[in-house]
Image (cartoon, rainbow, N blue to C red):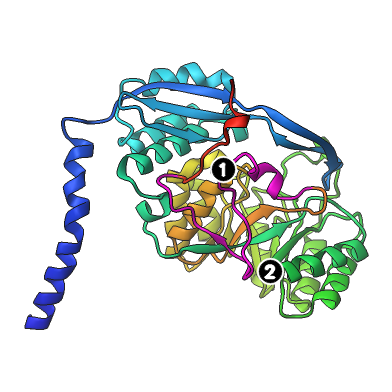
Amino acid sequence: MSHMQRTFNRRAFLKTLPALAAIPRLRGGARLKITDVRIVPLKVLKDLGSYPDWLGNPRPIRIGGGAIVEVHTDQGLVGIGPDMTPGVLEGVKALLIGTDPFDVDLHAERLYGIQAGTGYRGTASVEIALWDLIGKATGQPLYKLWGGGRERVAPYASMLRLSTPEERADIAVKLKSQGWQAIKYRASFPTMKEDIRLVETVRKAVGDDWVIMCDANKATLNYASVKGVPWSFTRAVQTALEYQRMKVYWLEEPLPRYDFDQLAELNRLIEMNLAGGEGNRGIHEFRTLLEKGSFDIVQPEVMLEGPTHLRKIAVLAESMNKMCIPHQGDSRLGTVCDLHLVASWPGAPYLEIFNDVPIGNYEHPFSIFENPLTLDKEGFFNLPQAPGLGMTIKKEFLPS
């Protein structure tokens, strides 16, 4: 080893000493202990009505409302996470109270074990709160704890409504002028002709230098329970080839969730990216999707899987030269958690943000924060620099 190499290695080691010195304070005699887990309701300051999504279901528009989870410790530190169904609260308390929040991998697996049936408001919310707590205890934002790498991430505007191609094109032009780098549409019209015309109209309006994605939303297991038209394999292939011609970046969920082999066959027939996985559960399912070649981009949902599973799924994807771009989250703390995750691993160029302006503006759910995420002029969200998730709830939304 040369003198220069020895000098470099010594300097690199010395840079780690401040962080190493902090570890005994966090893991030694003054170890944190969880004392309580609470669900804290948030006040609704303004009700703006609702709008229909692509299935015709009403999407409420509120400033505030819902709840957050708090994990309290004996040293006064509190971690926060998204809302959670009250039905699992007592089980979560029995699991966590008296334990060390830094045992997060163990907690994550045990929490995942009682997650079944709780859906988007399950115990993944508690795991997010645990990570927020760990970030606060170490004084680091989560993306730094998870590896760092990027100070900003590009969000894409995810549309939820079905509308006329002309209105969608007008909105796309406005979003592009505001700095947004990409948009995603619901390819859920009754006919393929309508799905194609939407993209043709938008592409003509915004030009070839802007990213368009399309979501067919066909991964549901029970079409009888929703409004929408299932696609045949032939329609999926024909639609994908047309989108490929129009330089669509990815097609999402063109076939049912567990149709692994047909998805893989479709993927072999086209060059554009296939994406999906928001409703899949467990690392084993994502491993199967990746091994079979069903998707080029897997989209696990943090509100179902939790951050620990998402990080493992991202490693699986990277090992197979695939991308991992998480599903939306909850538009509040869950989405902020996604932002930290995406910033900490390679190969995830975008973050999904529901932003169906002018009605479903992304700023509405983020308005509960003192420091809400906002799009900069270059089309990025800057990562919060405060410890943990880096977000603080405005006092006016909290109980008196």
Quarter of the image that includes the C terminus: top right
User: In the rendering, at what x and y percent does residue 216 appear?
Assistant: 76, 56
Apparent side of residue 344 relative to residue 9 in the rendered image (left or right): right
The residue that appears at 48% across and 46% down in the rendered structure is 284
The quadrant of the image that shows the N terminus is: bottom left
Residue neighbourhood size for the residue with mark 1, other residues' Cα within 10 Å, grouped as few (<14), some (14–19), many (≥20)? few
Q: How far apart are marks 1 and 2 (CA)?
A: 23 Å
- In magenta stretch: residue 366: yes
Asked whether residue 196 is in view, the answer is yes
Q: Which of marks 1 and 2 is in front?
A: 1
User: Which SS does the magenta portion mostly show?
Assistant: loop
Residue at 42% across, 54% down: 143
- The one of 21 and 214 positioned closer to us in this rendering: 21
Q: What residue type is labelled 2?
A: Gly
**What are the residue bounds of the magenta stretch?**
360-388
Q: Mark 1 points at which residue?
A: 370
Q: Mark 2 points at which residue?
A: 179
The answer to whether residue 57 is visible is no
Q: Where in the figure is residue 94, as x and y percent of width and height?
A: 40, 17
Q: What element carries label 2?
A: loop
Q: Please determine whether, in this image, residue 315 is positioned above or below residue 125.
A: below
Residue type, numbered disc 1: Glu
Along the viewing direction, whichever of 57 and 252 lies nearer the viewer: 57
Image quarter for residue 334? top right
Q: In this view, does 292 lie above or below 105?
A: below
Residue pictured at 31% horizontal, 20% vertical? 98
Query: Is disc 1 placed on a helix, strand or loop?
Result: loop
Marks 1 and 2, the one that precedes in the sequence: 2
